[in-house]
Image (cartoon, rainbow, N blue to C red):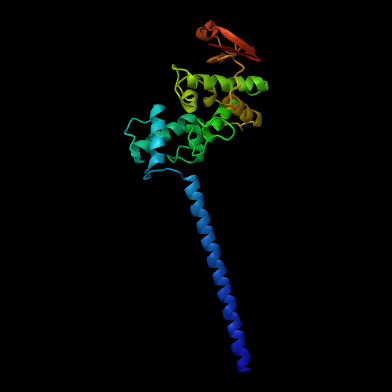
Amino acid sequence: MTVYKAFKNFYVFLLVFAILIGAGAAGFAAYELSYKEESVYAVSKYGSTGSEVKRIQQKLSELGYYKGSVDGIFGQNTQSAVKSFQRNVGITADGIVGPTTLLYLGLSGGSSSGGSSSYSDADVQLLGKVISAEARGESYEGQVAVGAVILNRVAHSSFPDSISGVVYQSGAFSCIYDSNWHQAVSETSKRAARDAINGWDPTGGAIYYYNPAKTSNSFMHSRPVTVVIGSHRFCK
């Protein structure tokens, strides 16, 4: 009986030990996952330093939100600039530069797959987002044409030299303020963005477009039209 009890107690000890080890492993795995998620989603925030912060500061400076030194230190001025940008484009204004804010800024660590190496994945996504918001319901050619106009502006000396700079230029695209901006980006718009980046320009070099049924702007109506595609007139 004594031997049996000793064996039984030893068995219980092993069982408890195994449970504790399993719980510890699960806890560590949860911590590791939490850490990974934080490192992925909280890319740059108050207190961060380094080259990524410099890229963010430079972009915010180009867009007119940041007036301080591009020093790679994420302080109060940088945080305020981030929040101002986030509020303006309609995303959560938490002052943290995660994937969504990077997308809207046109910043990404990777280069575009299948497109020009001068554009990042975030550039392609942002271009697709504008196409989806501006040309929803237009033909595929019409969607590519909208993307081409944005890229033509990037290359033109009279406009900002980045996709995000062109998109967020004051008064350029009203879609960033309406409900279409927050709709899911269509797959055709994503493809249209890649085709435009790869060089397809159905507009013949246009840097403007408008829907004559929706605008009475005299400047737009005075521009020489290069082509009409769907509801839009494309012009220089």
**Which residue: 53% across, 58% down?**
30
In front here: 169 or 111? 111
At which x and y percent is residue 16?
57, 76
**Which residue: 50% across, 58% down?**
31
Total marks drawn?
Answer: 0
Q: Is residue 179 visible?
A: no
Q: Is residue 93 above or below residue 234?
A: below
Q: Is residue 39 visible?
A: yes
Q: As drawn, which residue projects farthest toward the bottom?
A: 1
Q: Is residue 160 left or right of residue 13?
A: left
At which x and y percent is residue 214?
59, 13
Q: Is residue 224 above or below residue 2?
A: above
- Quarter of the rendering containing residue 52: top left
Q: Is residue 231 above or below residue 167?
A: above
- Quarter of the rendering containing residue 67: top left
At which x and y percent is residue 183?
60, 31
- Quarter of the rendering containing residue 201: top right
In front here: 134 or 139? 139
**Which residue: 37% across, 37% down?**
78
**Which residue: 51% across, 57% down?**
32
Q: Quadrant of the N terminus?
A: bottom right
